[in-house]
Image: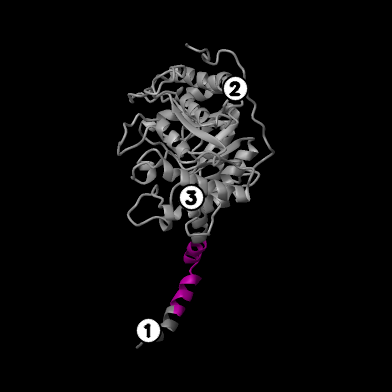
Amino acid sequence: MSPLDLLPCAWRGLRQLARNPLVARLLLAIPLLWFAGRVPQAVVRLGPPQTVQTVNPKMGVHTRLTDEVEEWKIQRTLEMVREMGAPWVVEYFPWGYYEPEKGRYDWSHPDLVVNHAIAQGLTVIARIDFVPGWARPPDTTFRYLPEEHFADYADFVAAFAQHFAGRVRHIIVWNEPNLSFEWGYRLPDPAGYTRLLQATYRQVKEVAPEVMVLAAGLAPTLAPPGSEWGMDDLEFLQRMCDAGAQGYFDGLAIHAYGWTLSPDDPAAPEALNFSRAELLHDVLVRNGEGHLPCFITEAGWNDHPRWAQAVPPGLRVDYTLRAYEKAQQDWPWCQMVGMWAFRYPRPARNFQDGFTFVSPGFAPKLVYSQVQEYAAGQQGAGSVQSDT
């Protein structure tokens, strides 16, 4: 007997089982149990346009929504930024996530982030890097961008600028190219980065001339000459200017961490502190670009209880408020200060958690509530007086 000969018998058996009331109930229950096990998705609406209320329009944060999946969490994060009183956000948009194949773009997640930011009245600064696998050799990191693929990166940034025309007006070209890690474990190359900047600037201006192209924020470092790990940020910026970067960026992104030092600790070439931002601006001035605005897209202090570079939570509040106030009062060339980092989608479970303003579960930390009071102009919100 072949298997086909058994089909009529099997069919009769199934029909007899289906006549059993208990079996019929179980069959009906299966799809109900399947639907009951599914978590319903929250319905998220943009809502009416909001406005940020603040006494300091230079306040900003780095939001890190790149890996946030649920839309309601994206919305709630940006709501809390607005409610804190910060009108600027810096967000990371990895090239490799959104162009998995040359010319095939997926804007679904960036659209969520940008649309919700705009609905909250926030201005978005987009940082773009992360090389897709098709644009780099095998066995290289996502920071390794060969020069023959500079045009592909420029194409993507131009496509991003065109897609978000009228919504995103500031784009950072790459991140910390003065570090070997960020340059694909190659020696930092100011002239090479300048060529990438030039190619990207030309492409963006062809499709979205109103977009401000920002030169990458450099890692604050005192790396000695010839270091395999990095190049001093002041030297790197000067060598960019020597290579012809002038005219190919509309502003400079700056990274200015305070570590354990006050924001009023004086700037010096041998010091890593918040005021080092002044020295980077000075490089622009010496090269005839002092009119260009600067954007501090990473900064801040850490309050982790078990990290040597952290400060107590109360001191972090004082330093953070003073940094915002210093940019407002003393640095007319500085357009914004974006503190790292507002919230992570999940706990880092290390010292990085000490940089956040809000927990993954949206519990505000002391620094959040005090910055919120400062932005509202309320008295007693920490000290914002200079200690110099």
SS for dot 3: helix
Q: Nearer the viewer, residue 35 or 157?
A: 157
Q: Are marks 3 and 1 in contact (CB under 8 Å)?
A: no
Q: Which residue is mark 1?
A: 3
Rendered location of residue 154, percent (x, y): 51, 51
Rendered location of residue 359, percent (x, y): 46, 32
Q: Residue furthest right?
A: 48
Mark 2 or mark 3, which is nearer the start of the sequence? 3
- CA distance for labels 3 and 1: 54 Å
Q: Is 161 inside the magenta-drawn segment?
A: no
Q: Are marks 1 and 2 in contact (CB under 8 Å)?
A: no
Q: Specify the segment rendered in magenta.
A: 11-28
Give the class, few, some or many, for how many residues have Cα within 10 Å of label 3's Cα (few <14, many ≥20): many
Q: Which residue is mark 3?
A: 95
Position above or below: 326 against 217: above
The answer to whether residue 37 is seen in the rendering is: no
Q: Is 13 inside the magenta-drawn segment?
A: yes
Rendered location of residue 173, percent (x, y): 50, 43
Kind of residue sitting beneath label 1: Pro
Q: Which residue is mark 2?
A: 375
